[in-house]
Amino acid sequence: MPNKLAQAVAHLRIQDESRPLMYCSATQMVSQILEPLKVWPAYIPRPVSFYNALIENVCVGCTMVINKETLKLVKKRIPTSLDNIIMHDWWIYLCTSSFGEVVFDPDPYIWYRQHQNNVLGGSTDGWVSKWRKRLSRFAKGKNRYILSKQAQQFIQLYGQDMSPQMYKDMDQFLDSYQKGVFSRMKYIWQSPFYRQSRLDNWIYKLVFVLRKL
């Protein structure tokens, strides 16, 4: 769409450019013949922060614009293996939100074309279909342990640079995850980490207790 980069630059210029910065936006999802379907993500009720980025990615890679400080940050400690990295855009969201600022624009400036064979990215599925697919992925092992592995990879690479509070919260998250079920249940009700959707947040808590995160 017109003005995509101009909008991103305008949003970033009002921030402190000496810090790592990242802009991302909603997308206008369209059909194979470019018919408008819906805006996604449609609503981000809670801050786009480290406490969201650890367990959820709301930043669509094709909408991202970063500054030089973010590029330096990501290049500073590149993982030797990408096996524990879920997706590049999620990793950049986690890095930037930990040490800088993420700006989310609810207005879409890109068309996100959908087709029947879409595997990643946005989805126009109904509620029942979405949850059937999610449960199927967990049952088949495709989603098991990926979040905890990525979190462990991040703290190994960047832990020494994190603020004391962030490090403490992340360390407690990983430590509690390794403990028994009652310890996990006790922790999860006071966990500072969150997903944007209330329903997704309950699913996160359940999967944490089941130790399938």
Image (spheres, rainbow, N blue to C red):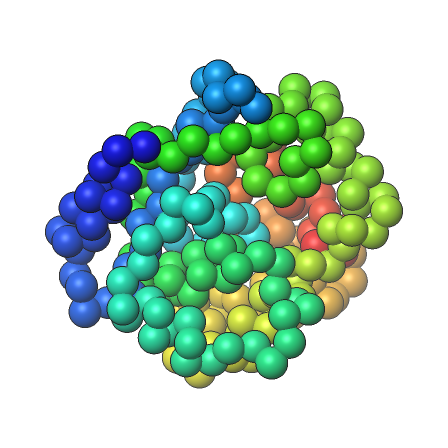
Task: Locate residue 85, reporting x and y percent.
Answer: 61, 64
Q: Is residue 19 visible?
A: yes
Question: At which x and y percent is residue 3?
Answer: 23, 37
Residue at the image point whose x is 28% and y is 40% from the top: 4
Q: Is residue 70 left or right of residue 58?
A: left
Direction right: furthest residue: 140
Question: x and y percent of residue 142 in the render?
Answer: 78, 51
Quadrant containing the C terminus in the rendered view: bottom right
Q: Taking 195 as reference, is 81 above or below it?
A: below
Q: Which residue appears at 46% of the width and 72% of the height?
A: 167
Q: Is residue 41 above or below residue 128?
A: below
For the N terminus, the image quarter is: top left
In the image: residue 158, left or right of residue 140: left
Residue 192 shows up from this direction: no
Q: Which residue is found at the position 26% from the left and 33% from the top? A: 2
Residue 166 percent location from the top left of the image: 43, 67
